[in-house]
Each structure stands twice: as C-alpha cells, then as structure tokens.
Image (spheres, rainbow, N blue to C red):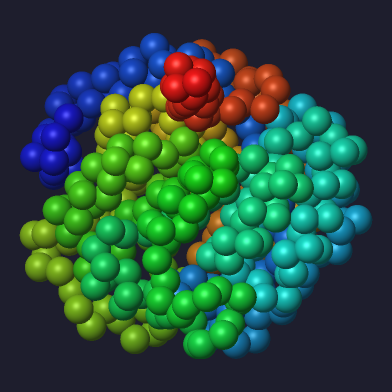
Amino acid sequence: MNFVEIHDWLRETDDRRLEELWRTADDVRRRNVGDEVHLRGLTEFSNHCVRRCAYCGLGTHTRGLERYRMNADEILACADRAVELEYGTIVLQSGQDSGVSGQWLADVIERIRQQTPLAVTLSVGERSEDELALWRRAGAGRYLLRFETSDRTLYERIHPDLPAGQAGLNGVRSDRIAILHQLRELGYEVGSGVMIGLPGQTYETLARDIELFGELDLDMIGSGPFIPNPHTPLARNGDKHPAPADRQVPNSETMSYKVIALTRIICPQANIPATTAVATLNGRTGYESGLRRGANVVMPNVTPPRYRALYEIYPAKAGVEQDGDYHSLLKERILAIGGRVGEGRGDSLNYINRRITNKEVATCAR
C-alpha cells in the first residue's frame, strides 16, 4: 500500500468501504499473527516527568498533581500480580523521570527476570544510550517510544526540548527516530507509534507516519487518539497553529480504527495493541473493535489503585477502573469475539524472523 492509498483510506467516510478495510486488516492479522491476543501487565511506576509536552498531564507544567514514585518491592508486587493473572509481559512505564537512575531501574529489571518468567518492556521516555544498553544487559527485551508525529514542526510545537544537562542526555534536541535506531542496534524489540488527531496534524502527515512505521520495521506499534487534558498548555492556550479544517485529522474513534487497520496492513507481523485511549472513547466495545480491525495486544493495568488515578496523562483514562473482576472479564471478552488469550511472552514475529534472518546472514558470511 502506497502513500496515496493510505491517505485516501484516512479520508474515507463510506461505511461499506470501511467495512472492506476492517475485513482486510482482520484477515492480514489472522494470517500473520493468528487469533492469540497477548496481555501485557501495565505498571505505571512513576508520574514524575522533566518534560513540558503541551498535551500531557504529567508534564512539569501541571500544578497540584500529587507526584509518586513506586519502590522496587511495590513494582515486584505488580510483577507477581501479572504472573498470577497469567500475563506474559510486564510493561514498566513512567514519565521521563530524572529521579530514576539507570542502575536502580537495572536492579529492578534483574529482580523481575530472576523471580518471574515475565518479559520486561520499558516505556520511560528519552534516555541516554548508556542507560538503554545497561537495561538491555539487565534483561529488558522491549522498549516503547512513540515518535508522536513525523512532522518536525508540529513535534517541536508540542514537545519542547529539555533544558541543557537534564535527564543525562548528551544533547537537548529531541530526536526520537535516532533513539529508535539505537534501540534496534542494542537488540531490543522496538515499539513506537503516534497520536491521532493532534491539533495541526493533517491527513498527509498521518499518512506519512504510517508509511514510516514500515520504513522503521517496527516490532510494536501503538497509536491512540489525542484526548485533551484540561491542565495542559494545549488545552489552556488552544492551538495557535491550526490546520485547515478540511485537512485536520479528527481525534475520533473511527480514525483510531483506521490507523490500527492500516498499520496492520503495512506491518503485518508487528504486535499492535488496542490502546487504552481508544477504550476511553468507547469503554463498552473499544478493545473488541480494535481487535477486530487488526490489533492483537491489550495492556490491562496492574498498577496499585492508589497510584493509578494519579497517572493522568489524559482525563477519564479507562485503566483507572481496572479492579475486581475486570481481568477475568477481559479474557471473556476476547473469547467472545473468537480470539484466544495468548500464552507466554508473545514476542513480535517481526522481531523473531529478523533475528533468524540475521543469524543466517552471519553464518553465510563466515
């Protein structure tokens, strides 16, 4: 599928045509990654963040937010909970927290790997190459870092650079594409994605984003709708650089499904989640609709409730109410649409096949 076709699908409004897109994406998903839906236990271990991203409720601009940072034993308890629920992966997520040292997090990763069978995924923002290498050696196998938008001008409007010397980075200019390449060289399964419907985002930009997923050969791709947080600069000050009304991408549920479906067609063997943000727009069937349109991963929240409500990137986050029977009901919902709950780590087939190919090339070279 080329840029023009992606662009045309993003603009498509005919329900019958969209049903064709949903069926195609679902068929590509079934043929390439099967009917297994892999569950990842999300642990939001810190809401501290040094950044001032215009759309995010965790930024330093948010006043009155109670900040927290879980200790190692609390994180290990979340890992134990993920094992109890028969998940294959724990996702350690935080703001870009300069108070979390590279060695401290490496020690936590090592404990999880020694004490549980879980794969460890990190989503902790832009960190130095030395830290990324340290965490890889400690046992982290996957890293999620959304590039948010391929439009550099739009990116810089919503994602200001860090002040000099912060977060242990060698430079102050944010370059997430370069970090994604570093992650690949370090041997991680590499995950990224974009925000859908950012003010100023055009259909052309979003089509280019989806093309870039394929060019980066991503192993995991998570994209969700922009949901305004009233405590952020973007919500308070409005968009001062709007796209023309006929070119602005809506932050709608349907547009989110279009991106999931097109991503599956472009990257057939990647792991693609039905994101919490989509479920926030439609708590009743959001996960199921995403899974029927190309997704094969869901990330239920195992963060302790007392912290979960404080990790408010955007308001009314669906994960806040994931208590009680939620986890067993989620499995029932997967079975009800003809899926199977995945077993084991659920490594990306894209990643597995690349490693096999690289080994074969290396053997031939010798």
Q: Is residue 127 above or below residue 257?
A: below
Where is residue 65? Give x, y as percent.
65, 80
Q: Position of residue 324 (x, y in %)?
A: 78, 41
> Taking 342 as reference, is 364 left or right?
left
The structure residue drawn at horizontal position 17% and vertical position 59%, both measured from the top left corner, is 202
For the N terminus, which image quadrant?
top left
Q: Residue at position x 57%, y 85% from top?
A: 165
Measured as percent of width and height from the top left, residue 343 is found at 68, 20
Instruction: Give the quadrant of residue 323.
Output: top right
Q: How many marks?
A: 0
- The residue nearer to you, when weighing 349 against 21, is 349
Residue 6 visible in the snapshot: yes
The correct choice, above or below, for 119 with respect to 62 in the image is above
Q: Residue at x 47, y 77 (%)?
A: 171
Q: Residue at x 60, y 69 (%)?
A: 96
Task: Choose top left, top right, bottom left or bottom right for residue 115.
Answer: top right
Q: Position of residue 194 (x, y in %)?
A: 37, 53
Query: For the view shown, which residue lies furthest in the front direction?
Result: 366
Going by the image, does 183 lie left or right of 24?
right
* Closer to us: 221 or 23: 221
For the question of whether residue 52 can be seen, the reply is no
Q: Nearer the viewer, residue 217 or 244?
A: 217
